[in-house]
Image: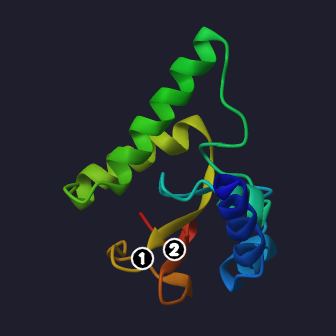
């Protein structure tokens, strides 16, 4: 009961969030959204394509390997210990797997030399075309 209630509250309260509205308004025809691993509700609440889809887990061996590799790449990109050079290398690998148009980060962990297109008290969204030049 408590797990279902928590899921229900998270889904419906966060569904009205300005961040989700903003993310829904973006154009994803040329790429997906890169999100931190702890943001598994973004895909379902904002209804946007993301790099690691938590909606359904892979079952086939090659899908599990690909999913695990994607998790490792995202973990490396968002690592607090990563230098900007490491972050750039991780992003290039991510982008070679799937074209990325937008990046979501925590407000406390901005990307240097990138211009945000959205910012609130917890989140920053970047357009890739304004980063990594």
Residue shown at 72%/54% (left/top)? 4
> Horizontal and vertical percent for residue 80?
24, 60
Q: CA distance from mark 2 to mark 1?
A: 6 Å
The residue at 71%/55% (across/down) is 43
Q: Quadrant of the C terminus?
A: bottom left
Compared with residue 57, is residue 55 higher up or lower down, i.e. above or below?
below
Residue 94 point in image, percent of width and height: 49, 42
Q: Are marks 2 and 1 in contact (CB under 8 Å)?
A: yes
Residue at which label 1 appears: 114
Q: Nearer the viewer, residue 129 or 54?
A: 54
First-in-chain label (2 vs 1): 1
> On the image, numbered disc 2 is attached to which residue?
130
The residue nearer to you, when weighing 90 against 2, is: 2
Q: Position of residue 103 (x, y in %)?
A: 54, 64
Relative to 63, 111 lies left or right: left
Element type at marker 2?
Answer: helix
Residue at the outermost front position: 1
Q: Dot 2, crowdedness within 10 Å: few (<14), some or many (≥20)?
A: some
User: Label 1 neighbourhood size at 10 Å, few (<14), some (14-19), many (20+)?
Assistant: some
Q: Is residue 23 left or right of residue 106?
A: right
- Examine the rendered structure and indicate whether residue 57 appears above or below residue 24: above
Residue toward you, 30 or 18? 18
* Secondary structure of the residue carrying numbered label 1: loop
Q: Residue furthest top?
A: 61
**Is 68 situated left or right of 113 in this image?**
right
Q: Is residue 89 among the parts visible in the rendering? A: yes
- Colour treatment of the image: rainbow
């Amino acid at each position: 009961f408590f797990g279902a209630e928590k899921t229900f509250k998270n889904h419906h309260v966060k569904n009205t969030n300005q961040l989700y509205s903003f993310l829904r308004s973006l154009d994803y025809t040329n790429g997906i959204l890169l999100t931190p691993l702890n943001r598994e509700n973004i895909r379902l609440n904002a209804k946007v394509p993301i790099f690691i889809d938590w909606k359904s887990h892979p079952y086939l061996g090659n899908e599990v390997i690909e999913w695990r590799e994607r998790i490792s790449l995202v973990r490396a990109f968002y690592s607090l210990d990563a230098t900007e050079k490491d972050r750039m290398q991780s992003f290039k690998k991510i982008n070679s797997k799937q074209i990325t148009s937008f990046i979501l980060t925590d407000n406390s962990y901005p990307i240097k030399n990138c211009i945000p297109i959205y910012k609130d008290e917890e989140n920053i969204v970047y357009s890739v075309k304004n980063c990594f030049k």
